[in-house]
Image (cartoon, rainbow, N blue to C red):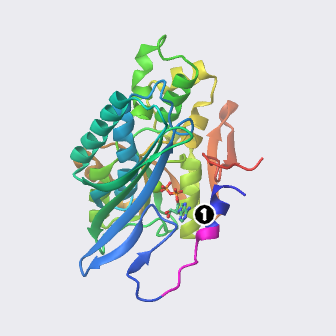
């Protein structure tokens, strides 16, 4: 039973009716009717010590901000604005008060930056490590919410920013390579302190040009598979079109990890993946410029199953490999 199988157990169990739930399990946020013009967006993400972070290299303040950022990223993915957050904190006995103080400052910084208010939470003893769960309530124009399920045949597949930086940064930390390679610090920062694409998500959703959108938390290979699966389509992506930091080549050589592998399977990019008709390409570029973001066309939506990656090999030979759901899974099957 993998992560998707577990979530599937909880899916489709709600009775129908006039509950106000517009969309439940399956997208980046649940969508709940607020009033005629506006919907609530609600999302929850958890960070667990030794799974998502290591206290040995993750400064408390950056961890506090990251806990907010990764949740806000799901609001960005649907084109919304965050309004309120709730924080549940599990701490081991004998925690360091200075650590908690710095963590709380990071949470406050995140809230200030993204324009939301900490409205409640819970504080408990953890018999394991530190556990952080945040719920964000956001809002969006009722007709502006962008779901994962709207991709159309022939759409371009776009991503924002650069892929693979956070995965490389995490691996550099894990391998103890950071002190010897200070020039690679921007990759480490991408892991420690990701910034969600809030402005870009809202502007793309507001344009009405984007058919499907989600954020990249588990790697493009998995997240685009979700988007395609829900849209009843497939996608072909091109390795040469994938955007990455100029530092990724050096990092991948040091880590002895394939660069493209880091870009599509690494996870924690917190960038946006979205689809739009090819005719919208120049307007999409203009919107991205206005939002201060870079976007890259990485592939096309088609009617074949799954997500396939085209790689060029030696002598210009092209190889197509199925990479569907090849990203991060908390419970991968052996
Ligand atoms: P994301 O990566 O965007 O945070 P997830 O992969 O964590 O999304 O979750 C996918 C969907 O499954 C979301 O709609 C989420 O609310 C739902 N989900 C995940 N775990 C559970 C659970 N234990 N019970 C109910 N819904 C869940
Ligand atoms: Mg998401």
Q: Residue at x 68, y 47 (%)?
A: 320
Q: Nearer the viewer, residue 279 or 197?
A: 197
Q: Specify start and end residues of the magenta stretch as a single range.
A: 9-16
**Quarter of the image holding residue 28?**
bottom left
Queried whether the magenta region covers residue 95, the answer comes back as no
Left or right, 108 with reference to 2:
left
Q: List the single residue furthest toward the bottom.
A: 17
Q: Is residue 221 above or below residue 96?
A: below
Coordinates of residue 103 in the picture (x, y in percent) = 34, 36
Q: Magenta stretch: dominant SS?
A: loop
Q: Residue at x 53, y 16 (%)?
A: 177
Q: Residue at x 34, y 42 (%)?
A: 294
Q: Nearer the viewer, residue 201 or 57?
A: 57
Coordinates of residue 237 in the picture (x, y in percent) = 56, 49
Queried whether the magenta region covers residue 12, the answer comes back as yes
Q: Residue at x 60, y 63 (%)?
A: 7
Q: Secondary structure at mark 1?
A: helix
Q: Is residue 55 visible?
A: yes
Write down the residue under mark 1: 7
**10 Å crowding of disc 1: few (<14), some (14-19), many (20+):** few
Coordinates of residue 77 in the picture (x, y in percent) = 39, 57
Q: Is residue 175 above or below residue 317?
A: above
Coordinates of residue 69 in the picture (x, y in percent) = 36, 45
Q: Cβ(mark 1) to ligand 1 < 8 Å?
A: yes
């Amino acid at each position: 039973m993998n992560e998707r199988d577990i979530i599937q157990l909880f899916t489709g169990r709600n009775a129908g009716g006039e509950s106000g739930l517009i969309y439940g399990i399956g997208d980046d946020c649940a969508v709940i009717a607020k009033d005629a013009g506006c919907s609530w967006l609600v999302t929850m993400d958890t960070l667990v010590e030794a799974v998502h972070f290591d206290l040995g290299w993750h400064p408390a303040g950056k961890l506090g901000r990251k806990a907010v950022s990764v949740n806000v990223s799901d609001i960005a993915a649907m084109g919304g604005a965050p309004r309120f957050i709730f924080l549940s904190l599990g701490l081991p006995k004998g925690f360091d008060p200075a650590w908690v103080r710095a963590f709380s400052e990071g949470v406050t910084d995140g809230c200030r930056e993204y324009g939301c208010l900490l409205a409640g939470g819970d504080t408990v003893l953890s018999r394991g490590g530190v556990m952080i769960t945040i719920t964000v309530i956001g809002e969006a124009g009722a007709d502006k919410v962008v779901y994962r399920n709207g991709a159309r045949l022939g759409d371009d597949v776009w991503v924002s920013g650069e892929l693979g930086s956070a995965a490389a940064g995490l691996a550099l930390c894990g391998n103890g390579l950071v002190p010897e390679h200070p020039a690679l610090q921007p990759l480490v920062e991408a892991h420690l302190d990701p910034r969600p694409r809030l402005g870009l998500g809202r502007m793309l959703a507001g344009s009405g040009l984007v058919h499907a959108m989600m954020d990249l938390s588990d790697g493009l290979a998995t997240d685009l598979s979700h988007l395609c699966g829900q849209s009843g389509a497939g996608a072909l992506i091109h390795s040469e079109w994938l955007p990455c930091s100029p530092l990724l080549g050096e990092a991948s050589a040091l880590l002895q990890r394939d660069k493209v592998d880091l870009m599509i399977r690494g996870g924690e990019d917190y960038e946006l993946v979205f689809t739009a008709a090819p005719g919208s390409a120049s307007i999409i570029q203009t919107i991205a410029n206005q939002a201060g973001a870079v976007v890259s066309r990485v592939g096309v939506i088609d009617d074949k199953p799954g997500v396939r990656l085209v790689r060029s090999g030696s002598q210009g030979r092209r190889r197509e490999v199925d990479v569907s759901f090849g990203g991060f899974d908390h419970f991968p099957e052996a």
